[in-house]
Image (cartoon, grey):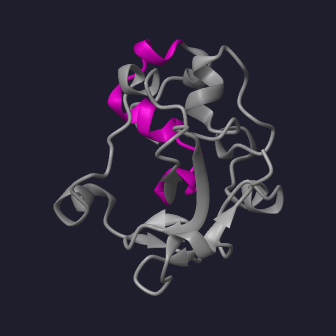
Amino acid sequence: MADLRARFWELELEELSRAEWEALCDGCGRCCLNKLEDEDTGEIVETNVACKLLDTGTAQCRDYRHRKAFVPDCLRLTPRLLKDIHWLPATCAYVRRAEGKPLPDWHHLLTGSRDAMVEAGASVAGRCISETVAGPLEHHVVEWDD
């Protein structure tokens, strides 16, 4: 991980380089799942239906660099945008750091491996289905443990 400062994840989000920001992502895949919004209340519920680019076995994007060409409404998270998004999970490294909290014990920057995240149940790897085969989203509403 070249160009990353030691313990950069303890810095304020605005201080991170682009490479550090990208490395901070825990890779859980929950931001890549489809959500439903209640028209009357504005409440957002999660589904286990993944973006067509998400590898459902690993929870990694199949073409992260070019994702917006295939999924135009895919968001590129930034510290500024993070303040307006309220549907990210409480376990999200970006959310935790924005709130001044430490990374979760299973985070790959602390453990050196993404396996701890999967073992802790924080990843959607193996627990989601692609939107290309899912059918109606209403049939896939879930509540993930944070």
Looking at the rendering, the stretch of residues picked out in magenta corresponds to 12-33
Identify which residue, 1 or 42, lies in the foreground. 42
Which residue is at the front of the view, 62 or 17? 62
Above or below, 17 against 28 in this view is above
Residue at image position (67%, 56%) is 114
Q: Which image quadrant is residue 56 in?
A: bottom right
Identify the residue at the far bottom of this view. Answer: 133
Identify whether 34 is placed above or below 9: below
Which residue is at the front of the view, 38 or 104?
Answer: 38
Q: Position of residue 59 (x, y in %)?
A: 55, 66
Instruction: Let me know if residue 58 appears in the view.
Output: no
Of 114 and 50, nearer the camera is 50
Residue at image x 45%, y 27%? 82
**Is residue 35 found left or right of 81 in the rendered image?**
right
Q: Quadrant of residue 90?
A: top right
Left or right of 83 on screen, residue 140: right
Pick out the residue farthest to the left.
69
